Image: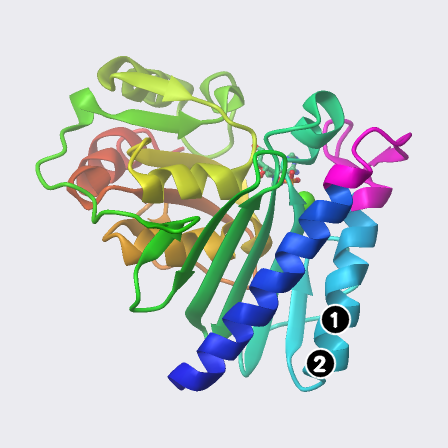
Amino acid sequence: MDKLLRDELYQQARNWILEAGSTIRNKINDPLDVSTKSNPNDLVTSMDKNTEKYFVEKIKTTYPDHLLLSEEGFGDDIRSLDGIVWIIDPIDGTMNFVQQKRNFAISIGIYHNGIGEIGLIYNVMDDILYHAKRGEGAFRDEVKLAPLKKGQVLEESVIGLNHLWLCQNRLVQEQSMQSLVKTVRGTRTYGSAALEFAYVAEGIVEAYITMSLAPWDIAAGIILVNEVGGITTDIDGNQLNMVDKNPVLTCHPDIHQRIVAEFIQKGRK
Ligand code: 2AM
Ligand code: CA
C-alpha cells in the first residue's frame, strides 16, 4: 500500500474510532440489552452490534471495494485477506463493558493482501488511543512508544494470561502453565485482548498468552507490537492464520523462545 493511501485510511479510521467511542461514552449509563453467544460468559450487547453497524456503514459508503471482517456478523464472509480488509472488534472486552463500564476497547486493523498496515486500539473510557502505521512506529496518543528494551528475562517479566487456563485448557497441561506463572515476576488479566496487546507494545507487560482468539481480537495489536520489535505467533511459535481462531502468544522477543520451548511445547497435550 502506498503511503498516501495509508495516511488517508489512517485518518478516516482514526476519526471514526474516536466518534464511535464518544457515542459509547455518551450512552454508557443507558439500559443494556445483553445476550450470550458461544457460552454463558461470552456476552454481546446492542452496543457491540450498533457500533459494528456504524463502521460497516462508514466503510461500505466510503470504500465500497474494501472488505470487512468483524465480530458481530455485519461484515463480509471472508476466507482470505486478499485486497484491503478492515478487521474490526466494535467492543473488545464486552464482559468488562457490561460488568465494569470500563476497561474495554475498539480495535481496528487494516490489512492489504495480508500485510498489516494500520492498527488502532481505543481505550474508550480512558480516552487513550494506541495507533500505528506499518514502518512508522507505534504511539499512545501523541507519544511514540519506545522499542522494547533488550536483555529482558522471564523471571523479571509480567505476563498477561486468562486465569482459566491454569485450571482447564485443551492445549497445554495445567501444571505447565502453573509453572510459567511461578517463574515470572507477576501475572495480569485485563479482560480485553486488544488492550493486552497495547500493553505489550507499551512495554508495561512483557507477554500475553491466550488459548483462543479471533482475528478481530488481535489484528490491530499485532501491528502495534511489531512496530516496537515484539513478536506475535501461535503458542508453538508458528505464523498465525488471520482468518481463523488461534492460540496466541505476543511478547518481547527475548522471552518468546523460552516461553514456547520450556512451558508450552513441553506441556503440550
Ligand atoms: P470480546 O470481549 O470481544 O469477546 C477476554 O479474555 C478476551 O478474550 C476478550 O478480548 C474477548 O473478546 C476475548 N474472547 C475471545 N473469544 C472469547 C469467548 N468465546 N468468550 C469470552 N471471551 C472471548
Ligand atoms: Ca467483541
Q: Is residue 208 magenta?
A: no
Residue 170 position, x and y percent, is: 51, 32
Q: Is residue 46 magenta?
A: yes
In this picture, is 238 found above or below 154?
below
Q: Residue 177: x, y in percent?
A: 36, 22
Dot 1 amino acid type: Lys
Disc 1 crowd rating (10 Å Cα; few below 14, some 14-19, many 20+) is some
Q: Quadrant of the N terminus?
A: bottom left
Which region shows up in magenta?
25-47
Q: Quadrant of residue 191?
A: top right
Report the disc number at residue 86: none
Q: Position of residue 231 (x, y in %)?
A: 28, 51
Q: Quadrant of the C terminus?
A: top left
Q: Quadrant of ligand 1?
A: top right
Residue 222 vs residue 238: left or right?
right
Badge 2 marks a residue whose secondary structure is: helix
Which residue has dot 1 on it? Answer: 58
Rendered residue at 52%/62% (across/down): 109
Q: Which residue is at 67% across, 82% downward?
A: 63
Image: 118 above or below 192: below
Q: Amino acid at mark 2?
A: Thr
* Disc assigned to residue 62: 2
Question: How many numbered dots are placed on residues in this image?
Answer: 2
Horizontally, residue 222 falls left or right of residue 92, namely: left
* Residue 195 higher or lower than 100, as above or below: below
Q: Contact (CB < 8 A) between labels 1 and 2?
A: yes
Residue 7 vertical placement versus 39 (above, below): below
